[in-house]
Amino acid sequence: MDSANSHRQYHTGKEKDTDDKNIQYKRRRTYIILGLFFFMGGMEYAVILPSLWLYLSGKFGAEEYFLGMVLSAFSFSAMIAGPILGRWSDVSRRPKIILLFGIVCEVGGNFMYFIGISKWFLVCSRLVTGISGGAEAVIVAEVARSTTEEKRTGIISVLIAVRQTGLLIGPGLNLFLRVLDFDLGPFKVNKLNSPGIFMSLMWTLQFVIVLTLYTDLHKLESHVESKDSDINDLLQVQASSKSDVEKYDQITNSSTLNENDEDNEEVISDKLIESAEKLMENNQKRLHQDGEIESQTNRHTIGDFNEETRVNSYGRTRYSSIEDRNEEVDHRIDESKNYGSEICKHRKETRKDYLEGRSKCRFFYDEYMREEIITVIATQFNSFFNQVALETMVTPLTKSLLDWGELENSLMYCFCGLLVIIVFFLVRCLSKRIQDRTLLVVGNALLATATAWLLFAVPSCPPNEFGENFPKFAVGTVLDIVALPFLVASGVSLYSKITRKETQGLSQGFRRTVVGMATILAPLWAGSTLPWPYVMFGVMLGLLCISLLMLALSFSKLKTGTQSNNGNSQTQSINVENQSCDKDDERKPLLA
């Protein structure tokens, strides 16, 4: 008996190690593909932006405001697509299909940009590509569902850092795109439309990679949970029969067996079999209550086994040898393991929509009209509004204060990109020791300091005085760049922790909509108030002060990982009976 158990445990452990390595490889590969998606998004923006105005004005004679329309079209489309794709992700739990859909939109939109029939056609092309911006919310939701709170901020930091890498590399690609001049069928490829066909080809390659190599993260996590559940089931059977096994071994190790020993041996072996049967029957009842699959076949199997085995004078089967009895015990234990795995599999496949049968208005009120949610969302809006506004005004400021041209601005963007990447990895390390709420406060404080410094320095700078103006401008710019990773990574991560896991796609889509509004309004504000720096920077600083005040008042409620009893939301009871299979269905209370 010991040798049989050891043999089975050896092969089970070896199989588990192989499966774990395979899952780790697939998970690592999937994260690389997700990072590549973010990289492509950043690279596309950096490739198209430098030549966009020349494309609009040189080929179509467009007015200046058309540049803002084309840039805003992407954000507007992403703002609308975010909640829709997020909701689709929550219902279907098939983010791979949504990512492929987003990539198809990127391919089509960039090809439309390459064709360039008219200036309005370019606006439409950016509207189509903007749909993929909503797919980024699906990615964040998938990461939030599949990671622990401790690791989530670090992973999000890396993904956004990869996007910044694309922004850094993108301008360099224009060095060879600007020299292209050839015919492609009926179309003329030149330095103005070449970014469109280049990005269309790159996104086509990304489509093939996702189609062939990507695996949904929640499926990998479900597989791990299923394996852990199987092992726990086996340990349950073995633990419940431990005393019987010891007695059984004592008997089987004896050189002779009398009739009484033989009866005891049968009792013990039957108890082992009954333990496995009991586990199967409990799983069967649990499955039948859920109404997910029919259990008649399994009931028939157990019934047949009972009829075949309890036929002797003691109500039990007489086996021809001890080996036959051992094989039957092993078979029943393995059968119970496989049966539990099937239950988990069917539950994952038949998962219902969380909002089904619920009042949508009530859910929105309970989920999003909470103090901590409003605080984080408002902080995200104010942060992105200030960040994008500063990015909009930086080129005019370098022209008027430092007399910089295209080369100097390109070098500045390269330096800023490198600095952002370094700080993102710094945030990744700090997130292991510092809470998200603290990192968010630090980021807002840094951005408020940068805005206050520019409010003081810019109006007092004389025009075209490099020596005097550069230190003042550099201090504000560096503080602004350092603040960005703290705000983005900790804000996204914290928001994912205080919203439900079941509706994470919708929540991230809603957040993406708020961010989209900020990125649309910020350039309009910065462009219209550039002649009045006190007004421009004063309003931006006021928004950041409001964010800091809200964070201070709600700081205690932004602590994750503890129980929350919010008066405005209905607390949902969690059924822990099926914890091994329904782990993803639980909403862990995260707020204090």
Image: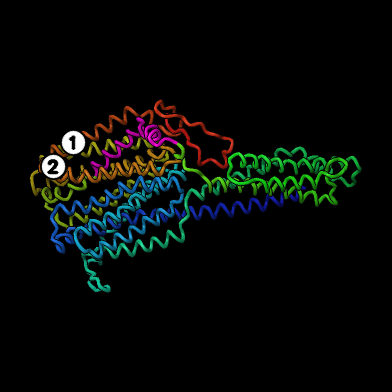
Against 36, residue 155 (above or below) is: above
Q: Residue furthest right?
A: 258
| Depth order, front residue of 583/180 | 583
Question: Could you tell me residue 21's position as x and y percent?
Answer: 55, 54
Q: Earlier in the sequence, mark 2 or mark 1?
A: 2
Give the CA distance from mark 2 to mark 1: 10 Å
Question: Could you tell me residue 82's position as x and y percent?
Answer: 34, 47
Q: Can residue 180 be seen by looking at this rendering?
A: no
Residue for point 32% across, 37% down: 377
Is residue 362 part of the magenta span, yes or no?
yes
Q: Is there CB contact under 8 Å for labels 2 and 1? A: yes
Residue for point 20% across, 52% down: 69
Q: Relative to residue 22, is residue 515 drawn left or right? A: left
Residue for point 54% across, 55% down: 22
Question: Could you tell me residue 423's position as x and y percent?
Answer: 32, 46
Q: Relative to residue 223, is residue 401 drawn left or right? A: left
Q: Quadrant of residue 405?
A: bottom left
Report the residue marked by disc 1: 539
Q: Quadrant of residue 151?
A: top left
Question: Could you tell me residue 73's position as x and y percent?
Answer: 24, 51
Q: Secondary structure at mark 2?
A: helix
Report the residue marked by disc 2: 529
